[in-house]
Structures are given as C-alpha cells and as structure tokens.
Image: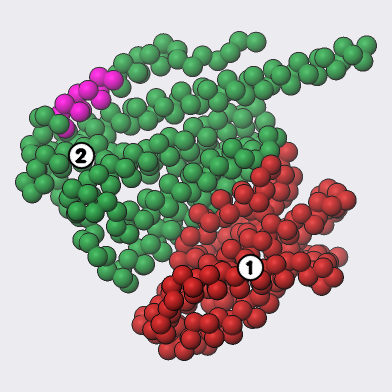
Amino acid sequence: MQRSRIFGPVGAVWFLLTLAAIVYATRLGLLLAPTEATMGNVARILYYHVPHSMLSLVFPYINFAASLFYLYWRRRDPLKALTADAVAIAGAEVTVVYGSICLLTGMLWGRVAWGIWWTWDARLTSMLLLWLLYVSYMMLRKLSATGQTHTLAAVLSVFAAIDVPIVYMSIRWWRTQHPAPVFGGGEDSGLDASMWPAFAWNIVAWALWGVLLLAMRYALERRRQEREQEAALQAIEASLEMAQ
Amino acid sequence: MSYLGHVMVHLRKDLRLEWRSRDAINGMLFFALLVVVVFSLAFDPTAAMSRQIAGGILWVALLFASIIALNQAWTREQRNRVLETQRMAPAPPSALFLGKAIANLIFVAIVEAILAPLFAVFYNLHIIGQGWLLVAVMPLGTWALVCNGTFFAALGLRTRNRELLLPLILFPISIPALLGMMQATTAILSGEFDPGPWIRLLIGYNVAFTAACLLLFETVLNAE
C-alpha cells in the first residue's frame, strides 16, 4: 500500500514561498517600517503578535467545519469522515500553536508597554479561554479510547463552537461592569498608512506558514490512519488464514 | 410509552438507586463541607469581605463536589453491562440522558439545600441584595453544571482516565456559566450591581447546551 507523501513538490514550492514571505515581512516589520511614536522599537512586536492573534481566530473555524463534516459522514462515508477528522485535528493543533504564540508575545509586549505581564482585560481573557478550550480538545483526543476518539472529539468541537460566542459576550459584560485596572489595550485604534505594508505582509506570511503547518499535520494524521487501517487489514487476513 | 414516560422511568430508577446507596449525596455533601471549611481557614474573611467572595467559593465548592457525583453517575450503568442493554432498548437515548441529568440536578439541589444554611453560618452572611433571586440563580447554575457534566461524563465513560478527563473538558466549557453564576450570586449577596444580565446569560447558556446535549447524546452513546 502506498503511503501518502508528507512533502510533495507542491509542498516544497509552498515552503519556499512561505520562507521568502516570512523573510520579506520580517525585514519590513523590523527594519523598514517607521518607528512607533510612543513605544519606539518595542511596538515592532505588533507585526508578529497581531497577525498571529488574528489567525488564531481563523483556524478554529476549520476545526469546527471539519468536525461537522465528520459527524455528517461518520455513518454515510467512513473514509471521507476520516479525512475530515484529520483536518479537524490539524486545525485544533495549529490553533493552539498560534494561540500560544499570541498569548506569549502579548505578555512580552504587555510587560514593556503596560508594566505588567497580564491583566484580566476582556480580550486577553477571551483569548486565554479559547486557548483552554482547544487544549482540552487535545487532551480528550489523547485520553479517549481508540475507537471513539474521532466521534467524541467532533462532539466536543461542536460544544466549543457553541461556547465561543457565549464566552465572548460574558467576558465583555464582566469587564464593562468592573472597569479594567489598566487601560483596555487600544493599540490599533488606527494604524498609520506607512505601517500597513509591513502589517499586511506579515499577515500573508504567517497565514502561508499556518496553512503549511496545517497541511503537514493533516498528511501526518492521514499516514497514521493508513497505518492503522493496514494493521487492521493484516489482522483480518491473519485470522482468515488460521480459519482455513 | 411517551417520551416523558421514558424520562420518568430513568429518573425513578436513578432516584431509587441513590436512595438505597446514598453514595453520591453523602460524598458530595462531605466534600463540599470540607471545601467550605478549607476556604474559610485560608481567607479568614470578615463579614463585608465574605459577601464579596462567598458567591465564588460556594460555586467552586459545588463544582468540585458535583464532579464526584457525575463521575459515579454512569459507572453504575456499566455494572452488569446495563449500558449495553440500554443502547439496544427501543427507547430514545436522549430520554436516558435527560432522566440521568434531572436525577443529578436533584442530588446537587439536596446538597445545596443542606449546605446553604451552613454556609451562611460559617461566613456570617447577611444578604443585602434581592435574596429571592437566589431561587432562580441556584437551579439555573446547577443545571448549567449538571447538564454538561452528565453529558461529558458519558463522553469519557470508556476512556482510560475517566476521573481525570471529566474536569479537564467540563471546566473550560463551563467557564462562562461559572462566571455567570458567581457574578449573579455576588450581585445578590452584596447588592452592588444588577444580577439581571448574568441570569439572562445563564438562561441562554442552559438553552443552548441543553439542546446540544439532547441532540448529540445518541452520537456519544453509540460512538464506536
């Protein structure tokens, strides 16, 4: 049985493009973009932090859509369902990676700009809760019994998707009732036109990188599934030979 | 038999089982009591301060305690392969879930009824806000915990680390509901702000997740 490739020619071209885009975007952000007026060079973390946080809000949709497709195909077309499940786990893991980067770089920035590592501001809190949801999704995949993992994970993904808007609203209410001790982080209350190219290029570069990660994780998961199927087939063949 | 009839049969069975063993309620009650005692030792609160923190502590104690009951809720069904029989039964699976969830709601409500006076004594509580609203907040908050908790306990039933998995997936999902019940209770105890939005949040949370649980329970029960 032929194993699916993890890194085909398309992947190689994509990788090189991504690498070029990251180099170009980083150069724009670190060297060419104008220095920010109040925070100085520290504000250059914007070009890394904000694209990651925006993208970490996109990948959960991939996970949710794939989980819905999995639940739909589960009985109708199990092979397609396995494909959807591989997309779902890839989406969840990339969400956690991007969310972690967003939280960590945000903390670094907050330490310099606000003087504190963390504040229970509405946006920080909702991001942390989103991150917690997807970590719990990965824990479920790790801990659940082999035959059931796909279905249970897809169900949890649907629950997480219902939870996200409620989290978002409740945290906003929470923070409007108790005014935040530190100002609510209004860094992008308008980005200067000269900063836009660097910002846009960084979004493109890190989106390309995220899709590459997603595709590689998907291919890895497909390989694992194929090995599982092979092992199951061999077990069936062996049992048939014994019967003869 | 009607849908309601199936729910009632499951509910009666769970209540009878609990009446004969009293494992869940006794365990929960003692555990919640221990949490309350430990917290009051840790904070040593004054009357004014206790109004600020009591809502949070009460719900944390109930949350931890209900995990105990929820973990046991489905293990009972696994003895003698009862659960397999119920999967084959021609009754709607969501009726099984609903009966179990209502039974758990009753167990936790009994614990609350015993715990609340003790709580008021230990923390010197005098309610400043509209106390009667607690009649709405307590069942809403309890249902938010118990409905998802019963569902996730079934979800983790056949996993290796069942006891570990339940809090790991229940807590992150429940955080908005926990925030809602804690804020509403604090608002009622301290009378400093309006509990209305938080009660509405709890109602919305309960409606959304009860619907999701009822729709997806069959998938989880037959997940193989």
Q: Position of residue B110 (x, y in %)?
A: 68, 77
In the rendered image, the vertical position of residue A221 relative to residue B194, given as above or below: above
Q: Which amino acid, mark 1?
A: Phe
Position of the C terminus of chain B, as image quadrant, is top right
Q: Position of residue B101 (x, y in %)?
A: 69, 64
Query: Quadrant of residue B30 in the image?
Result: bottom right
In the rendered image, the vertical position of residue A206 relative to residue B33, given as above or below: above
What residue sits right under mark 2 in the picture?
Answer: A45
**Helix, strand or loop for the magenta stretch, by majority:** helix
Q: Residue at x 55, y 61 (%)?
A: B208
One can see residue B155 in this view: no
Q: CA distance from mark 2 to mark 1?
A: 47 Å
In the rendered image, the vertical position of residue A209 relative to residue B17, given as above or below: above
User: Chain in red?
Assistant: B
Q: Position of residue B38 (x, y in %)?
A: 53, 70
Chain of the residue where label 1 is placed in the rendered structure? B
Q: Is residue A41 left or right of residue A103?
A: left
User: Chain in green?
Assistant: A
Query: Quadrant of residue A157 in the image?
Result: top right
Does the magenta portion include A27? yes
Q: Using a 10 Å C-alpha cutoff, classify the residue at mark 1 as few (fewer than 14 neighbours), some (14 to 19) or many (20 or more).
A: some
Quick one: A41 or A239, which is closer to the camera? Answer: A41
What residue sits right under mark 1 in the picture?
Answer: B31
The residue segment tinted magenta is: A19-29
One can see residue A176 in this view: yes
Q: Which amino acid, mark 2?
A: Ile
